[in-house]
Amino acid sequence: DTGVSQDPRHKITKRGQNVTFRCDPISEHNRLYWYRQTLGQGPEFLTYFQNEAQLEKSRLLSDRFSAERPKGSFSTLEIQRTEQGDSAMYLCASRGSSYEQYFGPGTRLTVT
Amino acid sequence: AQKVTQAQTEISVVEKEDVTLDCVYETRDTTYYLFWYKQPPSGELVFLIRRNSFDEQNEISGRYSWNFQKSTSSFNFTITASQVVDSAVYFCARSPNNAGNMLTFGGGTRLMVKP
């Protein structure tokens, strides 16, 4: 059983650049979540998809952030015009019919 | 916001000691779910347990046990006979009982188990 995978694992970018992260959920899971975790804090919810529909967005998700799940399988999270405050671990999770969310290894973003 | 509070930011124990990690939550929901996750140094969050709000029965899994007290809004986690491999950050989380089930996490407790 393949778990949730995320790519890349690490990304260093300069302020003002755009970055895109990818998440591949567990294959039979129709729900997909993005969270952000800063150093020493718990993860914070960003957005949620059921199949290809984006059903919920946190107020943390500014207009520089956009997420897609075009065919209800993998998802991408794009950050435009990155700022130093965007430096964090971006976590993806997926869920099937049960209520547990299974997390990927995360993408660590550093904005210099 | 309905918060989850883990008052202990760091705990240090010696191997084979028992340790309890505290979790207190706020909720206005009648039904909800509670979770514990482990984040080892590798960084990946590992699911440990889910508890439904309507089921207050405590649970034991090997060296792990969980004590759910709805009256005090607490969901504490005990590790018996701790081992060095238990060293990690542990997160308590809550979700509403709806289709989205977005998780609200506590700030985490860093557990260090020394040999």
Image (cartoon, grey):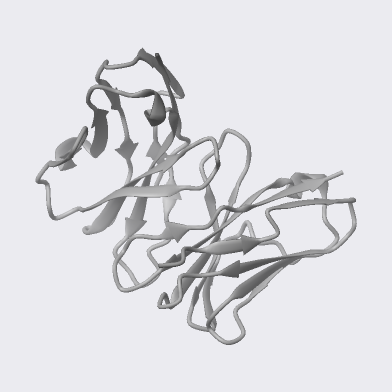
**Quadrant containing the C terminus of chain A in the rendered view:** top right
Q: State left or right for residue B82 relative to residue A60.
A: left
Which residue sits furthest left? B57
**Quadrant containing the N terminus of chain A in the rendered view:** bottom left
* B81 relative to A101, above or below: above
Q: State left or right for residue A87 relative to residue A82.
A: left
Residue B53 spot, x, y in % from top left: 19, 53
Q: Tell me which residue sits at (60%, 67%) in the image.
A: A23
Residue B55 spot, x, y in % from top left: 12, 52
Q: State left or right for residue B60 relative to residue B18.
A: left
Residue A102 spot, x, y in % from top left: 42, 59
Q: How many marks?
A: 0
Q: State left or right for residue B16 relative to residue A68.
A: left
Q: Tell me which residue sits at (9%, 45%) in the image.
A: B57
Q: Tell me which residue sits at (25%, 38%) in the image.
A: B75
Q: Is residue B6 visible?
A: yes
Q: Tell me which residue sits at (36%, 14%) in the image.
A: B13
* A74 relative to B56, above or below: below
Residue B37 spot, x, y in % from top left: 38, 44
User: In this orientation, which residue lies closer to the viewer: A54 or B45?
Assistant: B45
Q: Is residue B7 visible?
A: no
User: In this orientation, which residue lies closer to the viewer: A1 or B23?
Assistant: A1
